[in-house]
Image (cartoon, grey):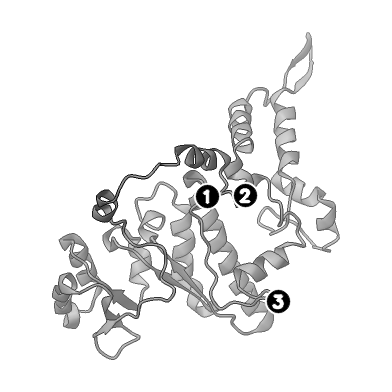
Amino acid sequence: MLQAAKENQPENAALGLEKVTIDTPVYFDLMEIIDEFRRLDIEMVAGQRGPKSGPLHGQFTRLLMRLESRLNDRRYDLIFKPQTYNTSASMDDLFRKLLGEENSNRKKIVVLDLSPVPFDVRGSLISLTLRCLFDFSYWHSRLKGSRFPIAIFADEAHIYLSDSASNQAPRESAERIAKEGRKYGISLTVISQRPREMSSTILSQCGSFLCLRISNPDDQSYVRNLLPDSIRGITSMFSSLRRGEAILIGDSMIMPTRIKVDRPNPAPDSADASFTAFWSEEPVELDVAGVLGTWRNQKVPR
């Protein structure tokens, strides 16, 4: 059904593809698939004693109810109702934006903020993004005979790249990059406060470690087991590191080095809330209605 939806898209026929498969990165109309589900769900066929239920009659009722719920939820418009990248031709612009290669505004760093994405589909979106970047690197090296370097930094990686995560798709996509990405010019850096919860496969492929303060004994022990025997003793320093200090270990350094990380300018809006300072001030009117309105609309007013 999905393959048929891709093949029936008029603009895809104009691309001159020899064959369209389920994995071919082309646009398709989701509503066409949903309409086909609806047809099969209520289909009646001829029988010996008159019309009877079709072979798939009622099989998609629950699925259609769930789809309708998602289609009516504005949080899922990014997936189900795209406004900008909704053609196969627009995929060129999408990849240029992901890779910072927009002709009028080229960037060396691109930040993907997925915090507004609903939690239950965030893993799928991360997995799809990682797969697309890996496939782009693979086919670029095949076409051009050279590599287009892409460095992916996964922040809070223990949330979606752990062995125990409910959605394994992001972890599997990241593991593929960690294991095979180097020969195609794509690398992965994982950033986590809980290395013990990270995928062991990904960490086993890491050649360098930038370790900030680690106070949890279990996490210290886990990192110690990842290091060569000759430098495992350095993990005793992890709990004494000050804010901004780190120990750089691995292939990128001749020997373990204690460094001081420069503060970013401008600083990210990620500092801890000062509870004592706030509670010491005079109370101010809380804009509950405004917060609820923004929550309900899933959009910050401008």
Identity of the amino acid at label 1? Val
Tag 3 or tag 1, which sits nearer the N-term? 3
Residue marked by disc 2: 78
Q: Are marks 1 and 2 in contact (CB under 8 Å)?
A: yes
Residue marked by disc 3: 104
> Which quadrant holds residue 267?
bottom left
- Find numbered disc 3 in the image and state the secondary structure of the residue it sits on: loop
Mark in front: 2 vs 3: 3
On screen, residue 126 versus residue 47, left or right, reads left
Q: Residue furthest bottom?
A: 254
Identity of the amino acid at label 3? Ser
> Which quadrant holds residue 12?
bottom right
Q: Residue at x 35, y 77 (%)?
A: 263
Q: Position of residue 160 (x, y in %)?
A: 41, 55
Q: What is the C-alpha distance between the residues marked 1 and 2?
A: 8 Å
Q: Position of residue 68 (x, y in %)?
A: 63, 32
The relative height of residue 214 versus residue 273 in the rendered view (above or below) is below
Q: What is the C-alpha distance between the residues marked 2 and 3?
A: 24 Å
Image disc number at residue 264: none
Q: Residue at x 69, y 26 (%)?
A: 41
Residue marked by disc 1: 117
Q: Residue at x 77, y 59 (%)?
A: 19
Identity of the amino acid at label 2? Leu
